[in-house]
Image (tube, rainbow, N blue to C red):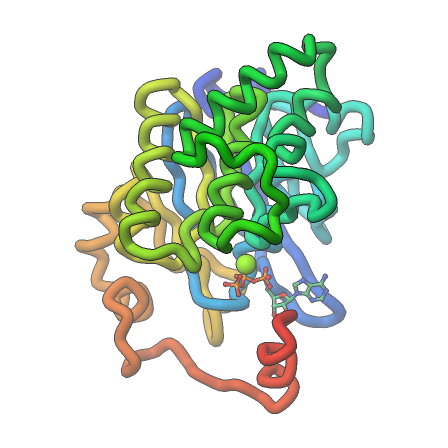
């Protein structure tokens, strides 16, 4: 495993170089490059199916890209061995798009999982951490509920609590606010802000909720779709993104139906969409 310590300043937590992902013959990521610095809330946005989850899966080492590299804390995640990945993952939390809570376990057991897997922590201390994390996400007293007994929005917050269980230096979140009402969206956004500004966590958040993106981001990146599939449409601070005249970007951040973003849905995609896997 190579290190970029000699080429990157120490405040670069994540560095993506020439990242390519091709599924079959279809390029989803077309050689993208970006860096995330310590303490930033870096928001990745883009239309449905443009490759946000794919990118996040590669960033956390859950998927090997077709080519390119991803350095986290100076270590290449794309070539790391399972043991090296385990060690690097101790330093980051992951909050997945579809909750991925274990249905047979209680909320408390779900949150305790990373603590039990990754550290020799005393059970009474684990119980205390679980209580603290539940309080953090506004779910005090729910430790004995099963995921099926709470709402979708509550499950999302449990996912976030679990991602924060090990007090990570880096937090990856995929659509942390999708499906939440505006108040809960604001609560989860505030949690992200508190984690980054008060605790110094670096966050990489995937979202297509524009209100949320502009509320939390220190820097943003938009991935293209349609004719711009696989490319970075724009990258910058929220102010730079707002001022960027790119029509594709402006249509997206304003949520307008008319513009250069194509809306093509084949029968196949429609069927996949209905079945929830497209
Ligand atoms: N394992 C896979 N094999 C083949 N194609 C895949 C795979 N995973 C994703 N894709 C395809 O890659 C494209 C990007 O998918 P991805 O889930 O990364 O998009 P997304 O931006 O996260 O979408 P959404 O906003 O709906 O969550 C889609 O066309 C999807 O069908
Ligand atoms: Mg996704």
| Residue 238 drawn at (x, y percent) | 24, 46
Q: Is residue 163 above or below residue 18?
A: above
- The residue lying at 48 percent from left, 75 percent from top is 226
Ligand 1 positioned in quadrant = bottom right
Tell me where residue 39 sits by quadrant.
top left
Q: Is residue 35 above or below residue 232?
A: above
Q: Is residue 11 above or below residue 274?
A: above
Tell me where residue 115 sits by quadrant.
top right
- The residue lying at 30 percent from left, 36 percent from top is 190
| Residue 239 drawn at (x, y percent) | 19, 46
The answer to whether residue 65 is left or right of residue 186 is right
The answer to whether residue 100 is left or right of residue 228 is right
Q: Is residue 7 visible?
A: no
Image quadrant for the C terminus? Answer: bottom right
Q: In the current view of this chain or complex, which residue is farthest to the bottom? A: 267
Tell me where residue 191 sits by quadrant.
top left
How many numbered circles are shown? 0
- The residue lying at 66 percent from left, 57 percent from top is 21
Q: Is residue 186 visible?
A: yes
- The residue lying at 48 percent from left, 68 percent from top is 48
| Residue 13 drawn at (x, y percent) | 50, 26
Image quadrant for the N terminus? Answer: top right
| Residue 131 drawn at (x, y percent) | 51, 23
The answer to whether residue 221 is left or right of residue 95 is left
Front-most of residues 264 and 139 = 139
Q: Is residue 148 above or below residue 113?
A: below
């Amino acid at each position: 495993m190579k290190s970029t310590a000699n080429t990157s300043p120490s405040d670069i937590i994540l560095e993506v170089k020439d990242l390519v992902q091709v599924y079959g013959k279809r390029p989803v990521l077309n050689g993208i490059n970006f860096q995330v610095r310590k303490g930033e809330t870096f928001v990745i946005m883009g239309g449905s199916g443009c490759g946000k989850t794919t990118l996040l899966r590669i960033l956390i080492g859950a998927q090997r890209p077709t080519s390119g590299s991803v350095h986290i804390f100076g270590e290449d995640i794309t070539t790391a061995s399972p043991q090296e990945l385990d060690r690097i993952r101790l330093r980051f939390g992951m909050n997945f798009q579809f909750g991925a809570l274990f249905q047979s376990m209680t909320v408390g057991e779900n949150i305790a999982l990373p603590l039990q897997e990754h550290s020799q922590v005393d059970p009474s201390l684990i119980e205390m951490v679980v209580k603290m994390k539940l309080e953090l996400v506004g779910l005090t007293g729910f430790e004995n509920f099963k995921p099926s007994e709470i709402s979708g929005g509550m499950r999302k917050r449990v996912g976030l609590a679990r991602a924060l269980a090990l007090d990570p230096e880096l937090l990856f979140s995929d659509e942390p606010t999708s499906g939440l009402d505006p108040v809960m969206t604001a609560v989860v956004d505030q949690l992200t802000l508190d984690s980054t500004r008060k605790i110094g966590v670096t966050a990489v958040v995937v979202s297509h909720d524009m209100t949320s993106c502009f509320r939390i981001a220190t820097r943003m990146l938009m991935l293209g779709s349609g004719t711009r599939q696989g490319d970075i449409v724009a990258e910058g601070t929220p102010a730079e993104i707002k001022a960027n005249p790119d029509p594709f970007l402006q249509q997206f951040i304003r949520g307008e139906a008319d513009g250069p973003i194509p809306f093509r849905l084949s029968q196949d995609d429609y069927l996949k969409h209905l079945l929830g896997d497209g």
